[in-house]
Image: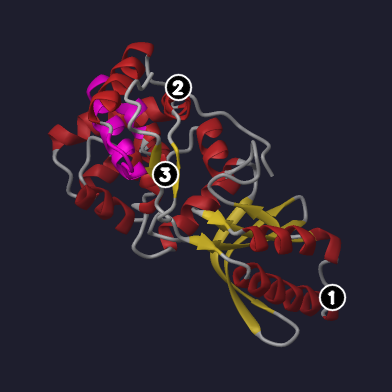
Amino acid sequence: MINDPSLTYVTKAGGYTAPFSSEKVRASLERAGASPKAIDAVIQELSLRAYPGMPTHMVHKIAFNLLRKFSRPAAGRYHLKQAIFELGPTGFPFEQFIAALFQQAGFAAVTNQVINGRCVKHEIDILAVKQSHYHIIECKYHQLAGTHCDVKTPLYVQARFKDIESGWAAAGGKEATACQAWLVTNTRFTQDALQYGQCAGLHLMSWDFPNGKSLKDVIDKTGLYPVTCLTTLNRNEKQRLLAKGVVLCETLAEHPSHFDAAGISPHKKAAAIAEAQHLCNKMVKMEWV
């Protein structure tokens, strides 16, 4: 436990303060698969280095750096939120990653599709199909912590979806009941965005919503981690993999030749393969959709 009474509040990414909870840190470390010894070491280190108003990103950095000495796979899982931010700067790797989550759930999912609406054509991020049910998925990727998805985005998504739905109906194609719209973000929704999206019938998914089937929940439960979780590679090496279209640790574990194509040294390749395999060793099929 953190014993320093001066650390009453931490500063969140959005600039506001909130009570610090060592139990939340402990729960995050446990979810990442850290050993009791590693967890105790992290908590003790935080108690020594704590100061009033410490930014949460500093809490995470201290925990991550120490955890990496105990277990790289656990550190990689703990690093998940930041790893998603590292999929940038463009939003395309994030779209590929979300498509992979749908594929893991049994969908045929493709990115960058153009669909005719009743009024105009629409370029959609992901089209996922399963048993004649069509899911149109819009991804809202942010690269900065503390950025929220506000109500303008679900309003925009709903308008586009209704035009596509009307276009399909006019063409005598897919029934409206077989088409569903999604909005997925790697950060959080504002309260207005949640209220409108749910009222309009959109499927919403963010870092922490919905409970039990949020982005972090689905990734942790399926074991489908992005390559940016790997602690054995530096940022440039991860970017080279992303540029080659490799977004999953699972892909690297099954096809190590991608390391060669990205120009990663044999020494790092061996360590990264082992880490990728450890990250993927608990992969399970999950009916989260």
**Percent x, y for residue 78?**
38, 33
Q: Gap between marks 1 and 2, in whole Å?
A: 49 Å
Q: Which kind of residue does numbered mark 2 sit on?
A: Glu
Which residue is found at the position 38% from the left and 12% from the top? 36
Task: Tell me the residue that label 1 is attached to.
Answer: 169
**Percent x, y for residue 175?**
85, 66
* Mark before the other along the chain sequence, 3 or 2: 2
Q: Quadrant of residue 183?
A: bottom right
Say whether residue 73 is magenta: yes
Tell me the tag on residue 243.
none
**Foreground of the two, 153 or 283:** 153
Q: Gap between marks 3 and 2, in whole Å?
A: 15 Å
> Horizontally, is 61 left or right of 116 in the view?
left
Which residue is found at the position 76% from the left and 74% from the top? 162
Q: Which kind of residue does numbered mark 1 sit on?
A: Ala
- How busy is the neighbourhood of tag 2: few (under 14 within 10 Å), some, or many (20 plus)? some
Q: Which residues are magenta?
A: 51-76
Task: Tell me the residue that label 3 is attached to.
Answer: 81
Q: How many marks?
A: 3
**Foreground of the two, 172 or 180:** 180
Asked which secondary structure carries label 1, the reply is helix
Q: Is residue 15 above or below residue 121?
A: above
Q: Nearer the viewer, mark 1 or mark 2?
A: 2
Q: Which kind of residue does numbered mark 3 sit on?
A: Lys
* Mark before the other along the chain sequence, 3 or 1: 3
Q: Is residue 226 above or below residue 157?
A: above
Q: Quadrant of residue 231?
A: top left
Main SS of the magenta segment? helix
Query: Is residue 178 visible to us here?
Result: yes
Tell me the tag on residue 30.
2
